[in-house]
Amino acid sequence: LAAALLSLAATAFDLQGHRGARGLAPENTLPAFERALAIGVSTLELDIGVTADGVVVVSHDPALSPAFVRDASGKWLPARGPLLKDLSLRELQQYDVGRIDPANPYARTFATQQPVDGARIPTLAQVFDLVRTRGARHVRFNIETKLSPQQPQDTVSAEAMTDALLQVVRDAGMRERVSIQSFDWRTLQRVQQREPGIPTVYLSIQTANTDNTKDGTWTAGLRLADHGSMPRMVKAAGGKVWAPNQGALTQALVREAQALGLQVIPWTVNNPADMDRIVGWGVDGLITDYPDRLREVLGKR
Ligand code: G3P
Ligand code: CA
């Protein structure tokens, strides 16, 4: 019975592969999502943007990055490349995002990544199709709207991105399988109005001194000073999940959030000792670049 309960507890824990499995394959690509599925994640974490022709694509940055984008002739981009919102899907998918430029320091951090030459930025619909094709019926999607509140001209508006995302989710029949996350809480408020059944995930960087935008979290008018703590602020905003930066989290905050009925799913935890410590605090899930490591840590508990 104990073993059965343990395995039940293990399945309820939400193992989220960050950008697919960024430590193992090029981030936010179909090969990364395949890798995460093969490891047995319960949720694929991914980021979205919207192209000039209105297609929802999977990318962390609003612009093509010189660190890991090669143009159609195979050359690394010399500097920050075009914005997603200025390229059509066809133009965007000319670029190769399957390898990190070895000259970029980022390459050392992710030396564990196995390159996949020829990988393209996928559409969100392609990711849904992949998961369907693989028969991974219980895998969920934690989708982050990548807005740039300090540089709003870099992306389509929060409203346009949210509405485009919701349309793709509806068209794919995936309403029951997604959560929507953002540092830009305006997105989440809009999701709550338009699709109240979709859980919203409130991302935060700090747990103190957050007054609105100074730390990069765009809190849609909510102020920490008015609520007393980040969990209470997320609850007041109507969130289902609080996804804090792991470095700013304490066990007391986990307990406070859960007592309010929130799930707590920190990001991005890559070191097995940190994973073990934070899992021990009773969090509901973890977001990691190395879902293989997290599976191992969970298996040993
Ligand atoms: O899910 C939260 C995490 O993905 C936020 O950080 O910058 O990796 O999107 P980032
Ligand atoms: Ca993300």
Image (cartoon, rainbow, N blue to C red):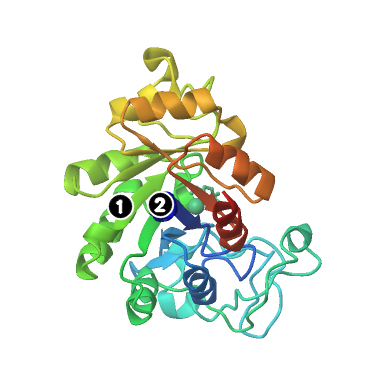
Q: Quadrant of residue 58?
A: bottom left
Q: Quadrant of residue 125?
A: bottom left
Q: Which mark is residue 162?
A: 1
Q: Residue at x 68, y 83 (%)?
A: 74
Q: Position of residue 6 (x, y in %)?
A: 44, 50
Which is more toward the observer, 14 or 31? Answer: 14
Q: Residues within 10 Å of mark 1 (few under 14, many from 20)?
A: many
Q: Residue at x 59, y 63 (%)?
A: 292
Please give left or right for residue 95 compared with residue 219 in the image: right
Q: Amino acid at mark 1?
A: Thr
Q: Secondary structure at mark 1?
A: helix
In this image, 200 relative to 147: left or right?
Answer: left
Amino acid type at circle 2 is: Thr
Mark-to-mark CA distance, 2 and 1:
7 Å
Residue at the image position 31 percent from the left and 57 percent from the top:
178
Q: Nearer the viewer, residue 282 or 53?
A: 282
Q: Earlier in the sequence, mark 2 or mark 1?
A: 2
